[in-house]
Image: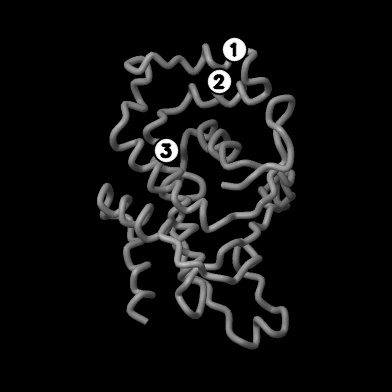
Amino acid sequence: MTDTVSSTFERRGSPTHVFEHLSCFLPGLFALGAHTLPLDKLDLLGIDLIQLGASEDYGYAAKAYRRLSSYNLKELHLWAAEGLAQTCWLTYADQPTGLGPDEVVMKFTPKTLAGNRYQAEADNYLWINALDKWKKSGSRGGVPGLKEKQPIIYTEDQRLNGKASERDYFVKKTGYLLRPEVSRDSIMSIHNINPALRLWNHFSCCGR
């Protein structure tokens, strides 16, 4: 989840790849929406994604509505909630203090296997691109982006000597501003909806 550096009306906006702590309220919002709204039965709300996608009011962004029409939106929102929540949790769990930074910059050179060689995708490769490929493959394997990851805590030597490169992001702003987005707005909400997601131990940092 990131801002774009240009409008999405005439063309697809270019992502900044900056992930802010403030974005971490979204996992809880997505999960609550999927839990309380009939996202898999949009006709009950009078919403037609195909019709929205054909509207000129949304410009290039209208293509996204047509694209989403092939998905179960309840599942899609829950997947997004889980993936984003894990990212937010990891930004905490990766730090020696257990407290997450205010901003990180996500790495944006994903690679795919072409034959027996890996090749880099475009810098603006999106999660929905990975989902489309996954669907075309018959949904084999796990949902892209939801594989459970373990925290990566760098040693002092790695940080000082520039050897810290295993994470999917770089820390941009180290400050922690006591924001509630991760714990209250997301982790707690998602835990109440789906306790099977093992993100609740985020709160272990509070005991330290």
Q: Are marks 2 and 1 in contact (CB under 8 Å)?
A: yes
**Image quadrant in which you'd find residue 53:** top right
- Could you say whether the residue bearing mark 2 is in a helix, strand or loop? helix
Residue at 49% over, 22% down: 69
Amino acid at dot 3: His
Above or below, comparing residue 202 to residue 11 in the picture: below
Amino acid at dot 2: Arg
Residue at 31% over, 26% down: 38
Between disc 3 and disc 2, whose residue precedes? 2
Cα gap from disc 2 to disc 1, whole angstroms? 8 Å
Residue with the mark numbered 2 = 66
Q: Position of residue 148 (x, y in %)?
A: 43, 59
Above or below, comparing residue 163 to residue 180 in the picture: below
- Could you say whether the residue bearing mark 1 is in a helix, strand or loop? helix
Cα gap from disc 3 to disc 1, whole angstroms? 23 Å
Residue with the mark numbered 1 = 54
How many neighbours does mark 3 have within 10 angstroms: few (below 14), some (14-19), or many (20 or more)? many
Residue with the mark numbered 3 = 77
